[in-house]
Image (cartoon, rainbow, N blue to C red):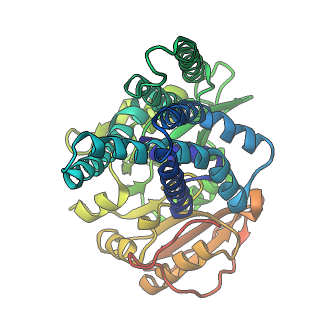
Amino acid sequence: MTYEIAAGRVLAPYFGTSLLTWTTVIATVLGGFSLGSGLGGFIAERPRARAVRAVRGALVATAVLMAVSPSLLGLLHDAGVRGTGGMLLSVLLVFFPASVCVTLPSPFLAKVAIEARPGREGSSLGLVLAAGSVGAIFGAILAGFVALPLIGATATFAACGALSLLCLPFVRGAPPGDAPTRRQDTLVSVAAAGFVAVAGLAGTPVCQYESGLSCLHVLRRGYEVRLISDGTTQAAERTAPDGGAAADADLALGYTQWLWARMDRDLGPAPTVLFVGGGGYTLPTRLLESRSGARAVAVEIDPLVTEVVREHLPRAAAMIARTGYAAEGGSGRLGLVHADGRVFLNETGRRFDAAVMDAFSSGSVPAHLVTQEAFARLRRIVDGPVYVNLIDTPDGPLARGVQAILRGLYPYVEAVRGPPGERGRGNILLAAAPRPLAPLEALPEGFAPARISPARAFTDDRGWVGHR
């Protein structure tokens, strides 16, 4: 389970995180488990010495394959493997072989347990199965709460390989008198251990900054710094030559320019605005800089994002330092909430004058934040306009589903599209309001009004499943 969860995490920088990626990982790993168990049954029927050697070989192969998984994934991506088909191929080539090898020993171990307690075959088999379930539970907890947040994906894969090698002493190989075979087994085990150690210590980390929720990189190009999350640009700031905040407050990304132009046109002198998705905190910073009476609450699920912003985005960092406070206590103009956006919406008792929905998981919005129920709750606590940022094709399924939600809740909705990027997707921006939206004087470069077709609104029961 640790390997399976780490596989889903390490895929994110290359193919994003969605229902499709997790479905593929789970199906592939379970398929490997099934094939490994079937082949392991034939191995268990061999003479004991041959079976033991096959089991030891499977453990060594498991260790090596697990340790190199991140590197193999990176090589495939560098070779041009892209899209849903590329994701399917990568998962199959990288994670299926290790999944087969790790379960090859299981039938042999079950046979040994049964033979060790003659007449109590049922309870012996039951204990083996129970031990496997307990191990899976422990592995899942270890991956999500300890390994991935603390040591990252690359080291987690190496640790999985190391655990496989630690099983070798408990699977005795050659008979006591067969010294050459014993020596060979020892050399193979030591070589595998060395390889796994090198893979874990010298392997290139997948992420510059990593938590259980985010894989972050900071990219500096000239006088601009960008925050990249799972391969998607989340925020950008212009900087001064010395690396500090630039003198002008202009926003660096086109989609934030449109959102700010819309907010600046629609909001009064002292609004309270909810931002679901903190990202680089560039929009809350711009709001508070331009309106001395404004207040903002930014809901960001991952505290690591806020830490990286404090370290690398000087203008937002300065605003957080001057006015930021933990929203559950304290005072200031910028409330910081580290929580899931949907949970915050469901639990908050506050009211807002406007809201910006700009939360992303990899290259797409989390499905539970783009449902009819989520926006209905938003409509009850926000008195004014709601602004939404999506990434999709100009008339893609995500844009259609979200527009359908907004048109069912608000009488006035407008949409614009940004320049398309990889695979034809770009920013799709929507504004919805209970009162007419005044036209903007101009759009950012490359942006144009979007024509989005009618569609079924997403719900909690039938929601967004991710880009294909």
User: Where does the image place residue 7, in percent across and percent down from the top left?
Assistant: 53, 45
Identify which residue, 80 or 171, lies in the foreground.
Answer: 171
Image side of residue 254 versus residue 361, left or right? right
Depicted 379 relative to depicted 411: above or below: above
- Work out whether residue 416 or residue 15 is closer to the camera in this orientation and state it: 15
State left or right for residue 33 relative to residue 327.
right
User: Outermost residue toward the right?
Assistant: 79
Q: Which image quadrant is residue 235 in?
A: top right
Q: Quadrant of residue 390?
A: bottom right
Residue 234 in view in this figure: no
- In the displayed structure, 300 sits above or below 143; it is below
Query: Residue 72 versus residue 187: which sits nearer the camera?
Result: 187
Residue 226 horizontal/vertical position (percent): 63, 37
- Residue at 49%, 83% in the rendered image: 457
Q: How many marks?
A: 0
Which one is in front, 65 or 51? 51
The spot of residue 304 in percent (x, y) is: 43, 35
Residue 274 in view: yes
Identified at 62% across, 24% down, the residue is: 203
On the image, the x and y values in percent for residue 237 come to: 61, 37
Residue in view at x 59 percent, y 52 percent = 16
Quadrant of the drawing holding the C terminus? bottom right
